[in-house]
Image (cartoon, rainbow, N blue to C red):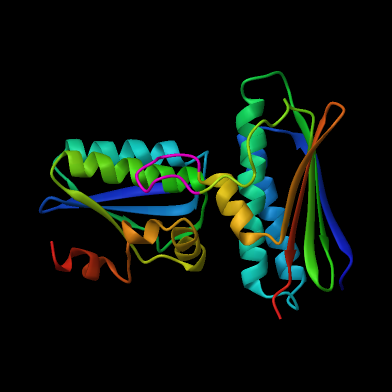
Amino acid sequence: MTEIQMKLEDGVAVLACEGRLNMVSAPRLKSAIEKAVDEGGTKVIVDLAETTFIDSSGLGTLIAGLKRARQAGGDLRVACCGDQAVAVLCLTNLDRILRPYPTITAARSDW
Amino acid sequence: MTGETYALRGTAHPECLEELHELVGRAGKEHPEVPDLDFMLLETAVIEVAGNVVEHAAATNTVTFAFELRVLSDALDVRIDDDGPEFVGDLRVGMPGELEESGRGLPMASSVLDEFTYTRDGSLNRWCLRRAVSV
């Protein structure tokens, strides 16, 4: 079971996603991102430190979240990616628009 | 020990993907001689193909599948058979545009496999995935 926890501070929403981000759990992350943006967290950081696997549904949700955040004047970044997450971001060329940040602090640094 | 087979049969529904994750993960743990990278990328491909089966099963009646992974000395070999509707896509389709939200599954699987084939055999879909073990 994938757990998603949100922390909203100074307009930055950090969403920690624990477990596998796949076709079962991706809709929950999508809802969580929408909720964060609706509550003013238009700068979204998805913390993937405890995410053990991402499939194409999960990537699609990150793109949907990126578009949602940008529509609201913000952006979405990914941080603390594991090896599999980095691999799928690179394989799909999404690392160009979802550049993996090494830490949450780094992801927040130039916002 | 190479040549070992890991198999799973069941009904194609989203929860079966968790069982496939566990099975491939167990195979990886039991075969430390195979680089982690190979199992990680094979698992990525397996879940995309199985996810495709599950997705298409959702629109029809019950679909059953048979999964088999063979750990060979030089490759990881997977066969997935399912009795769902015929696949009509193209395994060699390219990656979609950056802001598209879907369409990455099979291109991603294709990019990490050395062999990737699909055949329709009577009422069965037969998917063959092979990743050569890194040296």
Q: Is the residue A6 above or below the residue A107 in the image? A: above
Q: Is residue A86 magenta?
A: no
Quarter of the view holding residue B73: bottom right
Q: Is residue B100 magenta?
A: yes
Quarter of the view holding residue A31: top left
Which residue corresponds to the image point at 60% horizontal and 31% vertical from the top-left? Answer: B55
Horizontally, residue A72 falls left or right of residue A45, namely left
The reply to whether residue B86 is visible in this rendering is yes
Which residue corresponds to the image point at 53% horizontal and 48% vertical from the top-left? Answer: B94
Horizontally, residue B121 falls left or right of residue B84, namely right
Q: Is the residue A91 above or below the residue A11 in the image? A: below
Which residue corresponds to the image point at 67% horizontal and 35% vertical from the top-left? Answer: B53
Residue A80, image x and y in percent? Answer: 36, 66
Horizontally, residue A1 falls left or right of residue B117, namely left
Residue A83, image x and y in percent? Answer: 49, 68
> How many numbered marks does the figure carry?
0
Q: Is the residue B99 above or below the residue B75 in the image? A: above
Which residue corresponds to the image point at 57% horizontal and 49% vertical from the top-left? Answer: B107
Report the span colored magenta.
B95-103
Q: Nearer the viewer, residue B7 or B119?
A: B119
The residue lying furthest to the top in this view is B61
Magenta part, dominant SS = loop
